[in-house]
Image: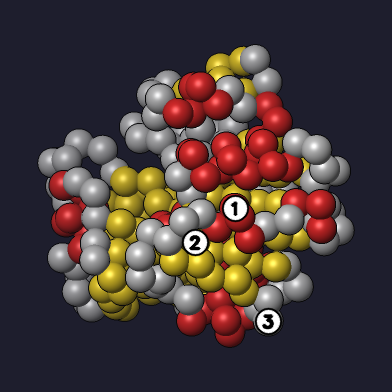
């Protein structure tokens, strides 16, 4: 068990949870979190938002019972977390862009810390949230409210692009990237049972094979994924 340092509401249904302790993780990896005993049965997979010497933070959206219970946590409460799990974003090559849509910005703050010269593009349906950390790290942050952040990205300017957000946004970015030399890697979200590849509940198709989001992902090369499969998630 670990202790909650703070659990701050940033916007409607959006929270940033900070947990005490010394942890390590690569950009794009996730932990399995739970603050309940038996119900819900499953822990919740949430990507690492930020790391310091004595804490780990998670940016999440309240979507169901599990995340609703997480949102009720207060400083000093106990929480169980296991991880880090999954394959994170690879080592970037050359000029790099980070593209996030809504809560998809969550894993990109740690990426921005590891790649401080990356260009950051963040899109929101309405009111932006969680921007302070990005502005503290990067001098090149583009924020768009309404529409799609993909319109602001010119893939031909970059060698590597990391993206996380709605499937439609990432698919549109993939199509825009096809005619360039940029390598696009996307972070996929899917309900998980175990987080370690045992239950087979989070399979997707990548490179023509069945892959597990928890162990083979959650990050995949965009050119290898089956977009029809992802749109059904």
How far apart, in angstroms, are the residues tagged by discs 1 and 2?
8 Å
Q: Secondary structure at mark 2?
A: strand
Q: Secondary structure at mark 3?
A: loop
Contact, CB < 8 Å: mark 1 with mark 2?
yes
Residue at 68% from the left image edge and 21% from the top image edge: 207
Task: Indicate the quadrant containing the N terminus: top left, top right, bottom left or bottom right.
Answer: bottom left
| Residue indicated by mark 2 | 123
**Position in image of residue 15 (x %, y %):** 30, 67
Q: Viewed as shown, does residue 5 lie left or right of 71?
A: right
| Residue indicated by mark 3 | 139
How far apart, in angstroms, are the residues tagged by discs 3 and 1?
19 Å
Q: Viewed as shown, does residue 179 lie left or right of 197?
A: right
Front in this rendered view, residue 69 or 129: 129
| Residue indicated by mark 1 | 150
**Disc on the earlier residue, 1 or 2:** 2
Front in this rendered view, residue 166 or 22: 166
Front in this rendered view, residue 211 or 102: 102
């Amino acid at each position: 068990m670990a202790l909650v340092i703070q659990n701050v509401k940033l916007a409607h249904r959006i929270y940033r949870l900070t947990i005490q302790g010394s942890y390590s993780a690569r950009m794009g990896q996730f932990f399995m979190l739970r603050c309940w005993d038996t119900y819900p049965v499953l822990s919740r997979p949430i990507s690492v938002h930020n790391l310091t010497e004595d804490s780990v933070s998670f940016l999440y959206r309240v979507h169901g019972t599990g995340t609703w219970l997480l949102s009720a946590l207060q400083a000093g409460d106990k929480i169980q977390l296991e991880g880090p799990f999954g394959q994170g974003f690879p080592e970037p090559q050359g000029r790099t862009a980070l593209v996030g849509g809504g809560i998809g910005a969550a894993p990109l703050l740690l990426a921005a810390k590891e790649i401080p010269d990356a260009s950051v593009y963040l899109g929101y349906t309405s009111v932006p949230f969680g921007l302070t950390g990005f502005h503290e790290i990067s001098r090149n942050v583009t924020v768009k409210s309404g529409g799609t952040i993909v319109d602001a990205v010119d893939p031909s300017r970059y060698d590597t692009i990391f993206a996380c957000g709605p499937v439609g946004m990432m698919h549109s970015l993939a199509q825009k990237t096809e005619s360039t030399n940029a390598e696009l890697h996307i972070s996929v979200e899917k309900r998980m049972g175990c987080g370690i590849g045992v239950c087979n509940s989070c399979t997707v198709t990548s490179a023509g094979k069945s892959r597990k989001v928890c162990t083979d992902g959650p990050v995949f090369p965009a050119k290898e994924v089956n977009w029809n499969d992802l749109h059904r998630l």
